[in-house]
Amino acid sequence: TPTIGVLALQGDVREHLVALAAADALARPVRRPEELDDLDGLVIPGGESTTMSKLAVVFGMLEPLRDFVRSGRPVYGTCAGMIMVADKLLDARADQETLGGVDMIVRRNAFGRQNESFEAAVDMTGIPGGPVHGIFIRAPWVESTGAAAEVLARYDGHTVAVRQGNVLATSFHPELTGDHRVHAFFVDMVRTAA
Ligand code: GLN
């Protein structure tokens, strides 16, 4: 059984812990650098990426998290977590730090200006059994991707799910639905990598 951490500086940590447990992983919240050591994978939750990135600096987690991504152990970011694994941001303050990991440009609050929050069916490559229920909350979209990043889902012409190697990111929040297929997909990535 893989052990998967959920970065617990800020955001919807509990929901990810529940979803990961339902997908047969051992899930635990992570706040300190040494807690990353024995993890097989890591989830970066939804929340507020500006706050999350500031807290990562305050808690001395920024470099350890960057090292974790570089180590090749799988990482999955939802919404604010997607922002955290982007190599570049739009509509963010110039000093907002990310971990990087996916060669993509992510636009913060991209859907938010037209539509604060909405739900939609999303077809996602790699997820069998029909569309997933996408919950978008002041969600980012992926403005562009580099050659190494694979687009897994689009909504309304915008990229909302990507994978590059062992890093997965979605604009939406599968952890807020009772449907654990995306978490199961990530747990499979972790099993394969381990
Ligand atoms: N708008 C938030 C941000 O920019 C993300 C929202 C979310 O995670 N639901 O960090």
Image (cartoon, grey):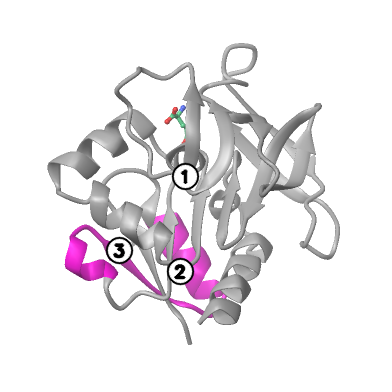
Query: 138 left or right of 129?
Result: left
Any part of residue 126 in sight? yes
Query: 115 left or right of 76?
Result: right
Label 3 Cα neighbours within 10 Å, binned few <14 / some 14-19 / many ≥20? some
Which callout, 2 or 3, points at the residue further toward the start of the chain? Answer: 3
The response on whether ligand 1 sits within 8 Å of label 1 is no
CA distance separating discs 1 and 3:
18 Å
The magenta span reads: 14-36
Q: Name the kind of residue labelled 3 in the image.
A: Pro
Question: Is 19 contained in the magenta span?
Answer: yes
Question: Is 148 contained in the magenta span?
Answer: no
Q: Nearer the viewer, mark 2 or mark 3?
A: 2
* Residue drawn 15% across the image and 49% down it: 60
Which callout, 1 or 2, points at the residue further toward the start of the chain? Answer: 2
Query: 55 left or right of 149?
Result: left
Q: Name the kind of residue labelled 1 in the image.
A: Val
Under circle 3, the secondary element is strand
CA distance separating discs 2 and 3:
17 Å
Q: Which residue is mark 3?
A: 29
User: In which image quadrant can residue 81 be found?
Assistant: top left
Indicate the position of residue 46 as horizontal and vertical percent values: 45, 42
Q: Which residue is mark 1?
A: 85
Q: Which residue is mark 2?
A: 73
Indicate the position of residue 178 as horizontal and vertical percent values: 62, 59
